[in-house]
Image: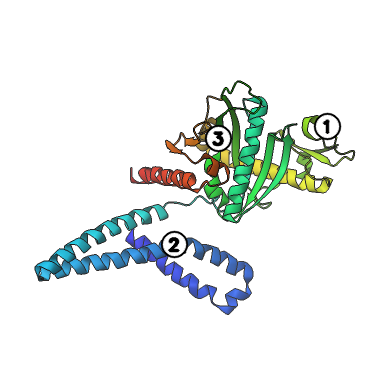
Amino acid sequence: MLEKLQLIEERHDELEKQLSDPAVIARQDEWRKLAKEHARLVEIVGVFRQYRRVDSDLREAKELLREGVDEEMSRFLKEESVTYTEKKAALAENLKILLLPRNPLDEKNVIMEVRAGTGGDEAALFAASLLRMYTRYAERQGWKADILASSQTDIGGFKEVIFVVEGQGAYSRLKFESGVHRVQRVPTTEASGRIHTSAATVAVLPEAEEVEVEINQNDLRIDTFCSTGPGGQSVNTTQSAVRITHLPTGLVVSCQDEKSQLKNRDKALRVLRARLFERAQQEQHAEQAEARRLQVGSGDRSERIRTYNFPQGRVSDHRINLTLYKLDQFLDGALDEMLEALITSDQAEKLRKVEA
């Protein structure tokens, strides 16, 4: 591991020299590529240098103990040695995690699809709550969220809403949100105060660039129609809504949120490109594809990755057995504590596979 880290440090130092070279700065495309590589190495090199300092301090403390010192200094050095040993072990574990193969998709923007599952209007209202939760989280991260397509209900819920989250590392943090989210609460229309259980499904797709997914225009059937509002009421008499069918796969994407037919077409293509990209990824990783299918499920109440219990004010993630009694804050976008726990669990699982 140390040899690999030394090579990484050498590459880091080499990149720093290149990034300050006026000739490289003048070639902006090359400079951006090098800057991106440098950014990936900064944390690893920082932790490695800290590891070396702690290791040096530990060896120095042990050397002084071997040379012989008075009782008070000996006690001090022994305590320092224990502290340095613990720090060294923690840094070594951190370095192992940092050296794990990175998912090349982690830095991508994401397209998220939230659909009401079992529960009728209550499920649609919960889908709207999830949309707000992810939008608020994006704001906290300094990211941008934009709705691409939606199908609203009369009472402010969503049968389906598709939106993009743009920001560095968006996929790395939001990819764990794929699955069935279950809610337990008393609907405002429930006179007897009985708790209802509803569900919504969330899918998280890495956004694909045009160069990554080439769409042949001859493979598309594009239909236009008048957009409608909640409950099917007419809101537009012009043919601004767009439905795109990808003939080879049968994938269909509709978009009617914009008044401009061109904007709706562009948004629909963005969603279609993401779905085609995910489809290609799944074909390359059949095992992962099956795992995702089982995780996302059908939206039935019995399938879930997380439960939001309003009477108890708690949110529970069933994959890592973590419960937080911070439901209000969570739904307002305070997701970091949960996401960090999911990331840590994922890293631990990867380490176990590497060390097995």
Task: Determine which residue is flagged by label 2.
Answer: 43
Whether 264 is drawn above or below 252: the answer is below
Q: How many angstroms separate mark 2 from mark 3 (CA)?
A: 31 Å
| SS label for mark 2 | helix
| SS label for mark 3 | strand
Which amino acid, mark 1?
Gln
Q: Are marks 2 and 1 in contact (CB under 8 Å)?
A: no
Q: Nearer the viewer, mark 2 or mark 1?
A: 1
Q: Residue 73 vs residue 143: left or right?
A: left
Is residue 99 something one can see in this rendering?
Answer: no
Task: Determine which residue is flagged by label 3.
Answer: 179
Q: How many angstroms separate mark 3 from mark 1 (CA)?
A: 31 Å
Residue at position x 49%, y 36% from top? 314
Q: Earlier in the sequence, mark 2 or mark 1?
A: 2
Which amino acid, mark 2?
Glu
Q: Nearer the viewer, residue 84 or 40?
A: 84
Task: Determine which residue is flagged by label 1.
Answer: 233
Q: Are marks 2 and 3 in contact (CB under 8 Å)?
A: no
Q: Position of residue 161 (x, y in %)?
A: 68, 38
Q: Position of residue 38 (x, y in %)?
A: 50, 65
Q: How many marks?
A: 3
Which amino acid, mark 3?
Gly
Quarter where residue 125 is shown = top right
Please, which residue is most extreme toward the bottom here? 22
Q: The C terminus lies in which quarter of the figure?
A: top left
Q: Are marks 3 and 1 in contact (CB under 8 Å)?
A: no
Q: Nearer the viewer, residue 193 or 320?
A: 193
Q: Nearer the viewer, residue 265 or 335?
A: 335
